[in-house]
Image (tube, rainbow, N blue to C red):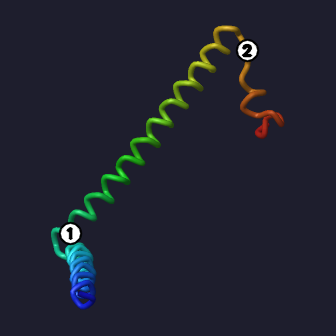
């Protein structure tokens, strides 16, 4: 009975090891490498899209501030150069 228990445990561990090794080996096939590259490129593209959206939001916000200041007749020099004009 004890031998049967150890045989079952050995078979289960062996099956798990074979499955893990097969999964790792699949990553080094041409299809696995292509899938990895595709996933990486999609991640980079999503990051770039997020960055561009953040920049656009910031630009729109700053443009609204500039238009509001222009409508009120304010100058933005103090806002852009708080230490004073650098070029004379």
Quadrant position of residue 7: bottom left
Position of residue 35 relative to residue 21, above or below, is above
Seen from this angle, which residue lies furthest top?
A: 72
Position of residue 76 relative to residue 83, above or below, is above
The residue labelled by disc 2 is 74
Describe residue 57's horizontal placement relative to residue 4 as left or right: right
Quadrant position of residue 28: bottom left
At a point 78% along the width and 27% down the height, the residue shown is 78
Foreground residue among 19 and 6: 6
Task: Give the structural element (helix, strand or loop) at label 1.
Answer: helix
Position of residue 4 relative to residue 43, above or below, is below
Describe residue 35's horizontal placement relative to residue 46 as left or right: left
Position of residue 15 relative to residue 77, above or below, is below
Contact between marks 1 and 2 (CB within 8 A): the answer is no
At a point 25% along the width and 80% down the height, the residue shown is 21
At a point 20% along the width and 77% down the height, the residue shown is 22
Residue 11, position as x, y percentages in the image? 21, 83
Quadrant position of residue 71: top right
The residue labelled by disc 1 is 32
């Amino acid at each position: 009975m004890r031998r049967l228990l150890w045989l079952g445990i050995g078979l289960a561990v062996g099956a798990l090891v074979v499955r893990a090794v097969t999964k790792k080996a699949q990553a080094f096939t041409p299809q696995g490498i292509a899938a990895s590259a595709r996933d990486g490129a999609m991640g980079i593209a999503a990051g770039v899209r997020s960055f561009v959206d953040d920049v656009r939001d910031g630009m729109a916000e700053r443009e609204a501030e500039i238009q509001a200041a222009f409508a009120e007749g304010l100058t933005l020099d103090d806002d852009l150069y708080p230490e004073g004009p650098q070029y004379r």
